[in-house]
Image: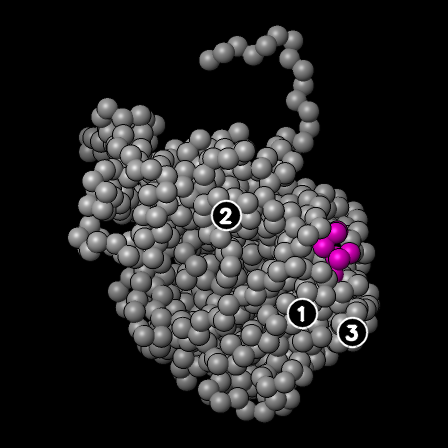
Amino acid sequence: MALKHVNAIIVGAGAGGGIVANELSQAGLSVVLLERGKWYTPFDDRKDDLRNQRTCVLGNSFGPDEERNPRVYADSRGREQVVQSNHWAYSNNAACVGGGTLSYGAMAWRFMEKDFRLRSTYGTVEGSTLEDWPITYSDLEPYYEKAEWEIGVSGDDSNNIFRAPRQRPLPMPPLPHPREHQILKPAAERLGLHPFDIPMLRNTVPYNGRGACMRCRWCVGFACEVNAKCGTQNTVIPKAISTGNCDLRTECIAREILTDERGRARGVAYFDSNNRLQQQTADLVIISCAAVESARLLLNSSSRLFPDGLGNRHDWVGRNLQGHAYTGAVGLFEQETYDDLGPGASIAICDFNHNNPGFVAGGLLANEFIRLPYQFASRGGQGVPRWGAAHKDFMRQYYRRSISVMGPMQEMPVFDSRVQLDPKVKDYWGIPVARLSGHRHQNDLLGTNFMAAKAEAWLREAGATTVLRSGPISLDGPSGGQHQAGPCRMGNDPQTSVVDKYCRIHDIDNVYVIDGSVHVNNGGFNPVLTIMAIAYYASANLLKTWKGTHVVS
Amino acid sequence: MQSGRLNRRAFLQAAIAAAAAAGTGIACSRNRTPWWFFTLDEARTLAAIADQIIPPDQDAGASWAGVVNYIDRQLCGPFQILQKTYREGLAAIDQTSRSLHGKLFADLDPPQQVALLHAVEQGFVPAAPWQQKSSAEFFRLILDHIMQGYYGDPRHGGNREGVSWKMLGIPYPPIRGRVRFNPPKLESPPRSR
């Protein structure tokens, strides 16, 4: 039996898709929200330090499962391997209702004004497809604010003199400062830096009908068992469903976007939770599967009119895959720094996001989330005994006496870092899988070296007796990871981008891509709040142009 | 209908077989060994290695903490594809030890064991036992697994009694949430199974 036609089908119930689902259902559109994973409750999480969404040596806790969802990874020399979802090269995010927002660390950064205008600020960068965004910070500002208040952000960035202007403060105060914060703050001030409380999508006081953070040490990589971490799964998605207009279908694997003979999309073909092939027709198709899977779905939707996949007339779908090059340093102290107060990450500086000598852009630096013992033991570093009696002494001496300062370096987009369809490997449902290949830009190496040195200086000033700096990053292979972005670039020129400034695919008037894949560059920040802001912004524009069953151009 | 019934029967038989295999670990267990995957000799070698990687001192060593048990269990689960690597790698370590000292690894003196592990880590080993896999690669693998077994969650078979967490001074039990409430007092002690 054919499924009832709806106004909009959204593929992917993560940071972007969850928000779009709520905006459209509140406006009265009938919506189907497809999600390939399950809807977990806070009690499905086992707080397992070897099986979670960050340390997944025994598997991922929130999917996708290891057996049915392979990808292919190729390094710069073209050596290929088929990887499972718990392999580092897979670039996994998560597969569940809420997507990455169920188990993220929840830093809630606004990009800076310059992040939308890197090309104008720094000029052309050799070997990179760096470009200005077709939108500016001020276009997104009201939607950043909406995300902060609707999803819920705590923190205090008033001491951050580099931040972009905001109209309204954050809705919740920061958590009381843990010991690491107390040690790092005066040190940063002595160095003339501008430390402040990290904005986080986390309740610090009761908000939105949920309680406050209980400050456990299982934060990044885990679902919050007191539901204090704010994701789309406990905010906008339940709201969308409560309108009666949104039908959430979990464990549904999208196969392709269906198009008609006039070149418009008419719906999505997907495998339901019983692996039956279904066709859901809709007036609008919205792709929010996160960078790698969004690109893969577009590429898999080839037809007579679109032989290379949707939106891919000029071979830009899947290009410019980015993430973040993480770098920093670990400081070892004589005094105890560990106070067992989660989430751990608390203090940050944005002094090195821009205007650095010798390279383009930069990134924030912040203290890290609490490191569980295996993470700490397996980290290593130059001069750290890897095994034997010395290793054990090191663990006893320094596990509770160390501070880690890390940050995401803004990566330069590279045209050849890309998502393609693998010609041979297929997933459990017979759909060609994503093949990730390419390399990073030289600028990423210069930037990370610079930031690691700055992290080291901060830790030394804070009193660290030994500092273990992150080694130089490898430029081999594509970037990606949880912060994956870029392969469906937003732009005004249809020849050098995939979607327009409202996230609509250039040559199809009823297909939108709304997630991190539209980012032109990914900021020196964790990208989730920007994904959320773009989702609000794109939905608002979509609704403005929505007339009954059609979007008017 | 006839074929439907047959299909269902075939399905049930397969399901029962699968359940039995999963429940008792038939697919993975061997005769005359308490382990799911390892032979007695392999377990002995691995325990000796583990106790040099994380040696016992005032805090328990890796073998007491159940690292061998952890790896054994994972080799019948998430590490299934590494079974051959372990079988060959542990044999290669014993072969190396035999060719250098005429004894199995577990029978060497502790200083000899440490020296041999350093050689394995750096790849300064006789070529013959290590034709399939580089010794340094195998060392990195078991080093990581031993760390997981020692510092990871006890539910996976290692870190007995949370010994490494106690060593690091992390409050125990570290799991709050569902167990943060005190369980109700029982009238009589729970019956043993």
Return the chain for callout 2: A
What residue did someone put label 3 on?
Answer: A192
- Asked if residue A300 is positioned above or below residue A213 in the image, the reply reads below
- Residue lying farthest to the left in this orientation: B128
Type of the residue with mark 3:
Gly
Type of the residue with mark 1:
Ala
Measured from the top left, where is residue B99 in percent x and y?
19, 45
Measured from the top left, where is residue A484 in percent x and y?
51, 67
Foreground residue, A277 or A389?
A389
Q: Are marks 2 and 1 on the same chain?
A: yes
Label tally: 3
> Would you identify the image quadrant in which residue B131 lies?
bottom left
Q: Within 10 Å of the Cα at label 2, are there few (<14), some (14-19), or many (20+) other Cα atoms?
A: some
Q: Is residue A263 visible?
A: no
Type of the residue with mark 2:
His
- Asked if residue A487 is positioned above or below residue B49 in the image, the reply reads below
Foreground disc of the pair 2, 1: 2
The Cα atoms of the two marked residues, 3 and 2, are separated by: 36 Å
What residue did someone put label 2 on?
Answer: A391
> Would you identify the image quadrant in which residue A107 lies?
bottom right
> Would you identify the image quadrant in which residue A419 lies?
bottom left
Q: Residue at x 36, y 61 (%)?
A: A71
The Cα atoms of the two marked residues, 2 and 1, are separated by: 26 Å
Tell me the SS state at disc 2: helix
Return the chain for callout 1: A
- Asked if residue A408 is positioned above or below residue A392 in the image, the reply reads below
Q: Residue at x 59, y 10 (%)?
A: B189
- Name the image colouring: one colour
**Predominant secondary structure in magenta?**
helix
Q: Is residue A183 magenta?
A: yes
